[in-house]
């Protein structure tokens, strides 16, 4: 479930044809936008996170909130930055 959502969003966001550094994503990673306000912060995370149940919960929340129409043109996760940073820090220790 989570991987297909991220794959669809990545394909859609990378097809916009932007030429700035914001579109450069290292192989094996994906960009996500995080925040509960209009101004969201971009994070680049390893695709290995997609297999983790905690990250999949965030993807489920994103699907409930936005479906496949993400306002930033990429995968947008509706949680605050501190929570996301805390989660990814824990995932870095696990993975």
Image (cartoon, rainbow, N blue to C red):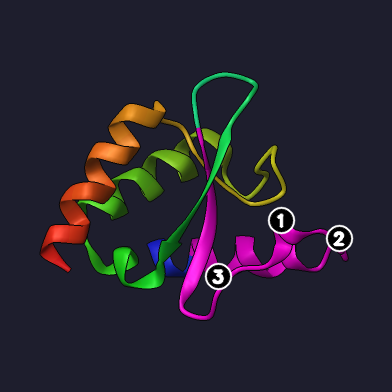
Helix or strand or loop: what does disc 3 sit on?
A: helix
Q: Residue furthest top?
A: 37
Camera-nearest residue between 33 and 85 = 85
- Residue 93 percent coordinates (x, y): 13, 59
- Residue 40 percent coordinates (x, y): 58, 31
Residue 1 visible, this orientation: no
Camera-nearest residue between 23 and 38 = 23
Q: Is residue 68 above or below residue 17?
A: above
What residue is drawn where x is 39% and y is 26%?
80
Q: Quadrant of residue 14?
A: bottom right
Q: Disc 2 to disc 1, how far (Cα)?
A: 8 Å
**Residues at badges 2 and 1 in contact (C-beta under 8 Å)?**
yes
Helix or strand or loop: what does disc 2 sit on?
A: loop
Residue bearing the label numbered 2: 18
The answer to whether residue 18 is magenta is yes
What segment is highlighted magenta in the picture? Answer: 5-34
Q: Residue furthest front?
A: 21
**Residues at badges 3 and 2 in contact (C-beta under 8 Å)?**
no
Q: Residue furthest bottom?
A: 27
Camera-nearest residue between 56 and 45 = 45
Residue bearing the label numbered 1: 22
């Amino acid at each position: 479930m989570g991987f297909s959502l991220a794959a669809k969003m990545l394909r859609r966001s990378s097809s916009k044809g932007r030429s700035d550094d914001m579109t450069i994503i290292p192989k094996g990673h994906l960009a996500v936008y995080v925040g509960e306000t209009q101004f969201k912060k971009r994070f680049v995370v390893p695709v290995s996170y997609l297999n983790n149940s905690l990250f999949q919960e965030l993807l489920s929340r994103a699907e409930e909130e936005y479906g496949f129409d993400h306002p930033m043109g990429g995968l947008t996760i509706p949680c605050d930055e501190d929570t996301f940073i805390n989660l990814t820090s824990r995932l870095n220790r696990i993975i």
